[in-house]
Amino acid sequence: MADLKQFLELFNPLPGNHYLQVTTRADEITDALTSTLEKVGGNLSVALYNDENLDFSKPFRAPARSNDIIIFQDTFVSHKNQKMILKIAYTSLANTADIIIMEKKGVMDIEKMKNMLEEFEFRAPNDIDVLPEYDLVMAKKMHMWGNGL
């Protein structure tokens, strides 16, 4: 995979931050996020969708307001219930937290994804080109907007 420097610049972890990566495999991105968070006393949890764990019809689990960022890597577009996944993500994110959806280039309809995020009360969705292998959309959960959680 390409240099992750630009990708990691999307993150500004603070002491005690908790990120959740929802993915099909642990990889260089997982390692880089783990290292970045450990430097400030933060934590990365990983929810794996694979033959031994979740399938694409079941949701991941996370307590309410327990995450500062959720990263969906190669999982969101394949999931059979994307709306349920966005509801769970919204509930499990702290106020002013971020959601990142990354899919291999050409898999995700970026404009449709941005519209879906807006529909589920995530604000300021942007597509960001920081990894040559991935399309990436990032948005923010705003305090006291929309669902009010």
Image (cartoon, helix red, strand yellow):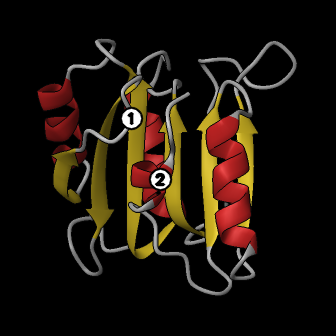
Residue 89, x across and y down, in percent: 48, 51
Write down the residue under mark 2. 5
Disc ID at residue 11:
none
Number of numbered discs present? 2
Query: On screen, 103 above or below 37?
Result: above
Q: Residue at x 23, y 32 (%)?
A: 113
In the picture, measured across the screen, residue 115 lies left or right of residue 41, that is: left
The three-letter code of the residue at mark 2 reads Lys
Distance between the alpha carbons at the discs numbered 2 and 1: 9 Å
Dot 1 crowding, Cα within 10 Å, few <14, some 14–19, many 20+: some
User: Considering only vertical position in the picture, is 57 above or below 142?
Assistant: above
Quarter holding residue 136: top left
Residue beneath the point at 36% across and 27% down: 132
Local SS, label 2: helix
The secondary structure type at the circle numbered 1 is: loop
Residue 92: name its quadrant: bottom right
Residue drawn where x is 33% and y is 13% of the image:
107
Where residue 141 appears, x then y in whole percent? 32, 66
The one nearer the camera, 17 or 78, is 17
Q: Which mark is residue 131?
A: 1
Give the residue type that dot 1 points to: Leu
At x 41%, y 20%, the residue is: 77
Does the image show residue 97?
A: yes
